[in-house]
Image: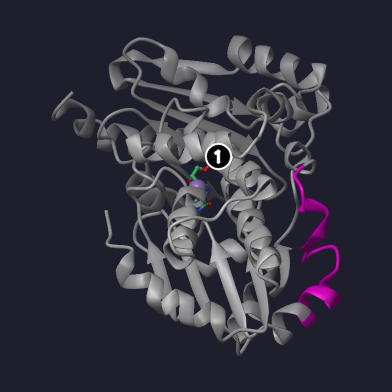
Amino acid sequence: MIDLSKYTKELSKHFSASENILLICHINPDGDSVGAQLALYHYFKAIGKNVDMMAPNNLQEFLKWMDGAVQINIFTKDRKKCKTLIEGADLIVMLDFNQTGRLGEAEKSVIASKARKVVIDHHLDPENVADLIISDPSKCSTSELVHELICDINGGKFMNRSYAEALYVGIITDTGNFEHGAYSSRTFRIVADLLDSGIIKEQIINLIYNNFSADRLRLQGFALNKRMVVIPEFKTSYIYLSKSDLKEYNHVKGDTEGFVNMPLSIKGINFSALFIEKDNFIKLSFRSKGHFPSNEFASQYFSGGGHLNAAGGEYSDTLENTIAYFLKVLKENVWRFEEKD
Ligand code: 5GP
Ligand code: MN
């Protein structure tokens, strides 16, 4: 855990010195990246700052209901406006990522911007991409970190309903509704304050989790029934979905979210992978239980990264070859399961 007070003074200076603040989430943003972004947005609005938001490529359907989400500019949909915002900002805050590659097509413009840059994140091994990097992997979510920073800056407390809702979404999505990840007693103290602010947790849970299409549910059934492979001797299971599988179930972005977690519920399975066929590459997601370093595996073999127990990457080959390569490198790493398990 890092000592936040070491950072809040400098962060506070950046906030005070800035007239035009631009908040950026990562490519294909999850609930935490958008939650942290919207929470900061509502904070800056409440204190009367000029603040804008940008997402590199899209916003998933299940996050669009959030207060302020319509104000998020999508770089790939409105490049002109986004470039103007990037160039006009005097402070850019990047949320829930620590590599400029996670900015997608916005990367060049953000790097070229003269704005001062701040990273607020909870992933390991940040790249040196900003003037101030606040990175704490002991936090369950960037949203939790954002709240602690804002409270520190704001004399111990800050809360309003839209802000609380955004943080709640960030925390539940990054912990699978308090099932995994680095949540702690501190997280629950924050959540207690969020609930006291008047948010309706049942409503939020419904909007986040009970919002699927019938096709999505059928795709999940198909994935488990026909596309899941279990390798007990490697304590591993993987699911693969081809483009034609996805087409058959009228796949829309976000439909496969969470699939990678499912094989971990099998007794004795400590590592899970999901292969999704894209146009020119295979997108991989990894989840592990215990000490198997998904992030090292992802960065060493699949140009990716992430957390110890949740990571991702990609590989430019066919689905078949990617699975064969995965099995080969998995075999080379299988000792990592056996060491302490
Ligand atoms: P997911 O499997 O949910 O897409 O991603 C899990 C975690 O891995 C996230 O925390 C995300 O930051 C990280 N991650 C996923 N894909 C990539 C990738 O291509 N590159 C890097 N560096 N991290 C990734
Ligand atoms: Mn996160």
Q: Is residue 333 visible?
A: yes
> Magenta residues?
66-84
Relative image position of residue 67 (x, y in whole percent): 77, 48
The C terminus, quarter of image:
top left
Q: Residue at x 33, y 63 (%)?
A: 4
Viewer-proximal residue, 202 or 79?
Answer: 202
How many numbered marks are there? 1
98 relative to 292 in the view: left or right: right
Q: Residue at x 74, y 36 (%)?
A: 62
124 relative to 317 in the view: left or right: left
Q: Is mark 1 within 8 Å of ligand 2?
A: no
Label 1: few (<14), some (14–19) or many (≥20) C-alpha neighbours in 10 Å: many
Instruction: Relative to 272, say whether 151 is above or below.
Output: below
Instruction: Relative to 142, say whether 134 is above or below.
Output: below
340 relative to 292 in the view: left or right: left
- 303 within the magenta span: no
Mark 1, residue position: 194
Q: Quadrant of residue 242?
A: top right
Relative image position of residue 60 (x, y in whole percent): 74, 43
Relative image position of residue 143 (x, y in whole percent): 52, 50
Instruction: Relative to 30, say whether 79 is above or below.
Output: below
Q: Residue at x 63, y 61 (%)?
A: 43
Viewer-proximal residue, 232 or 47?
Answer: 47
Viewer-proximal residue, 241 or 221?
Answer: 221
Q: Secondary structure at mark 1?
A: helix
Amino acid on which the number 1 mark rests in the picture: Leu
Q: Give the residue at the far left of this rendering.
A: 339
Q: Is residue 282 visible?
A: no
Q: Residue at x 41, y 11 (%)?
A: 266
Relative image position of residue 276 (x, y in whole percent): 62, 36
